[in-house]
Amino acid sequence: MTAAEQAERAVAEIIGTFTSGAHRGVVVDSPPGAGKSTLVVRTSTELARQGEQICVVAQTNSQVDDLIIRMATAADDLRIGRLSAGDYRPSDEVSRFPFVRVASKIDDLASCKIIVGTAAKWVYVTDGQWPWAIIDEAYQMRSDMLLRIASRFERMLFVGDPGQLDPFSTVEESHRWAGLAWDPMQSAVAVLLRNNPDLPQLRLPLSWRLPPSAAPVVAKAFYPFTGFEAATAPQTRGMKATAAGLGVGPVDDVIDIAAETGWGFYEMPARNTIRTDAEAVQATVAIATRVLQRGTETYCEHAPGGRRIEPGRIAVGAAHRDQVTALRQALEASGGSGIRVDTANRLQGAEFDVTVMLHPLSGRIDATAFHLESGRLCVLTSRHRHACIVVGRAGIPDLLDTHPSVEPIYLDAMTKFPDGWEANQAMLAHLAGHRVAAF
Amino acid sequence: MSTLTALARVQAAHHGAAQQICTVRHLHVHDRPLVLVPLTLAGETNAPLAAMVGDRHGNPQVLVVPRPRLREQRFVFVERLANIVLSYVDGFTDDVETLPAKRKDDEPRQRFTDAPQVWVPNPGGVEYLRLMGRMTRFRQTTGDYAVAAGVPQLGKWATWLAEQAEYPDSSVLVAATQALTGFWATGQSSLEDGNLAALMGWIAPPAGMTAEQAAATAEDPILCPPAGPATDPQFDRLVLAPALRDLEEAPSDAVRVRVQERLTLALREQMQPTWDRVWQAIGLLGAQQPGGSVEQRWAADRDRFSDFVAYLRDTGHPQAKRDSAVLGARKLHDMERRLANFEAQRAFDDPLVMGEQRMTGEAFTGIVTWSDPLRTVTLSRRVLRPGIVVETEDPLRLVAGDADLRDPQRPNQKASILRLSESAGKISVSLELQGGTGSGLTAPPGSVPAVGERVTYSRLQVSYMSPGQFPARDQTPWTHGGPPQPYAPATSDAAEDWS
């Protein structure tokens, strides 16, 4: 069975389970780049073509726009409605499609077969019930949001990536609800499954994004119980720098190693630094711009003949916003504009050819729960189609050893696997084999 | 810890004196607070041992549980504590003010003109009240294990107070160490700041001592007994245990009375220094200038106090042991919104707090160098969108496209960043303004910042807090376990063990 057939079978099973109507909820776990959006678009267009009306709930406005563009491209025979705030102005891409209707009241979208909106907007729909709904990025949604919209829908398909960052609250220290089955700080899926353990839980088995060099590593570190595989064969993906390195620097060496193996770890001398470690920022930026300077080409199933990496296909990631600001300024100063620089939170869902990441624990004197969160590292190391280069100070394993997880554990609390500490160790153990020591 | 607080700590260590991290106090300080210094018995959860309580510094009531392992004696203690606390709380339910209705069709609202404020030495005291509430609010006044009427009533109030303390903008239950560290930074670690004696040593060292000496002295449990609720283990071993044993083994009532006097005196000595320090802290904080929004937040506290009194007079069921799904979601919603409002109010009241926002690049202050109050743009029709340029030296992290920024002087006007340009270390921010300019195509004078005016833009805003759309309790969806059982008092609650 080819990868495409295997994926098709999984999608058909998911759609079949959901549309059979036998379950009020179906959960689909999707590893990075496994075709989650494709599944959402297919399920909704297929149901709509059968004459059903289907609602889609996403978490952010850009996710909604993204879905609408994909749906409108896939099915120009269906009326699509966008439930929006009053002051929303459709982007140029969305307004290209005349059959997409934008309204702030649900009644104005009654004629639409597919209605897409953010969860925050669905909250204001206080009446009525719709037979079908898809909750996209359900692991990013907080359970209190699900509480507010769940009654609007008869059957729901929850789609999301369990390895990504947990939803966020500004009220951090409250343990008031720890252990409750409906803890509002937990993700929608965690609460749903805690209260309804018998719901079918399916998964997409193949990652179309991660290359064969990355899928087993990411699967072992962040998806230890379910796992997934790369959809592509090792010979399908490749990367090489057309201009040879000058053979003089570790920056070129780490790019060569990453081109060859898919991973690179640029290890700088151990030092405790402030968050915006100037040396690490310079090194990260130097690597990202050097990939461009050397005219690096990639070939893959979409471009078997190879193509040159454009700035927009490179991402630089970090844990904190001040680091992102420092990286962005340094990149602009060194001619790397066009390269996306962002925090792990904002890189969720995005895809690039090459990523250069500043390790969250680099140069730190302590390892807090924030820095240990497995989702953060998972996002940072699973955005690439070809290679991921990690920049960090030496001594992170020692830092981990001196900072075991000490968060209090509450009775009946929902524990999330894998533990961030362990995931970090697994990832570092793998990176150790791709290490280039900086001077 | 923010950069400014870190700097203040370094300065405190350097100068040997605590440094202010706020220009005004953001906490309401009552002119007649109730102070409670509780002590518990080691080895059992929240088993009361003694307490010093009262609303006047010179007149503390000392409550002691002579045989703290006996269940009946715990309830005697709670009953005595209840008499004091409930009569203090009831003292605020006499004077009522009438407020105009929020909406047209509503009745005018009433609320009490004042509310209680309870001070405990540290967060341990807050937890003490929370657990005390849990252990007493379900007790019953009739049947088996009947307790005095004040016991479950105190439990409801203790629970209410501890719950309010979870919200950062509430001032009805105050932990002294937190109130002090919210205003001063010391030259010691935040762990050491948890010791009230050490913290007060930095802020107001006794005459003839440096701050460091005072803080070092505070580490000696003989000179400075712990602020509780846990007692000093040496005290337990050398004083408490022998006294409790002597009480058990007392051959006659006369001996028992004398041992009891000895124990009371010893416990009083353990609590008195903390008692004095809490009052000293109240005095120090009370002497500071309050921030502009303190009054408004205290009014909200009075609103919630009035609501709770009304609730107790109505059904008055004890608060549930656990939040239901809907209640939990509502509370989290409230917490997040109140926290956001509190942070905004603090920053608007206090340039040092706003300074922290500016340090992180989330806010900027600058001078308006260009202003076009008549700028219009064409959306579906031509609308007024005044433009200004602000020149700032702040390390800005906002980028073009960031919207919904506000200047506290014009809270109804939103600004979005059109462009940023940098030259000679200064950043010029081009802003498009919307709102607060009336409905026409000309902005009324003063509604748009003029050239030369100093403005501060940030994402902070004090907004109306919508209660949010939540399902009713009996409409809890199946995803969250469905509707919960309604509360019914259970006789088993009265038989529940203390810990």
Image (cartoon, coloured by chain):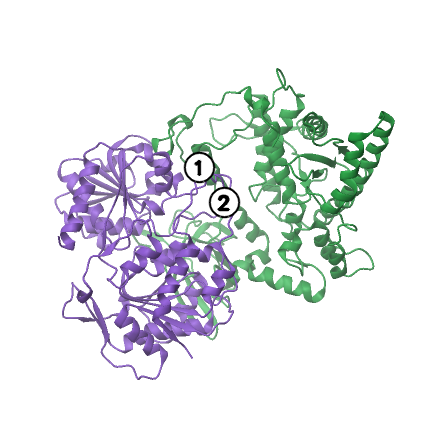
Chain colours: A purple, B green
User: Which quadrant is the N terminus of chain B positioned in?
Assistant: bottom right
In the image, residue B209 lies at what x, y percent? 80, 60
Q: Rate crowding at label 1 as few (under 14), some (14 to 19) or many (20 or more) other CA atoms within 10 Å.
A: many
Q: CA distance from mark 2 to mark 1?
A: 22 Å
Nearer to me, B134 or A156: B134
Mark 2 lies on residue? A409
Which amino acid type is marked by label 1?
Answer: Ala
Is B190 displayed left or right of B404 in the figure?
right
Mark 2 residue type: Ile
Disc 1, SS: helix
Image quadrant of residue A340?
Answer: bottom left
Give x and y (percent) for residue A289.
32, 74
Q: State yes or no: discs 2 and 1 in contact (Cβ < 8 Å).
A: no
The residue beneath circle 1 is: B329
Which label lies toward us, 2 or 1?
2
Q: Position of residue B399 (x, y in %)?
A: 40, 62
Q: Residue at x 45, y 41 (%)?
A: A413
> Callout 2: 10 Å neighbours few (<14), some, many (20+)?
few
Pick the front one: A215 or A155: A215
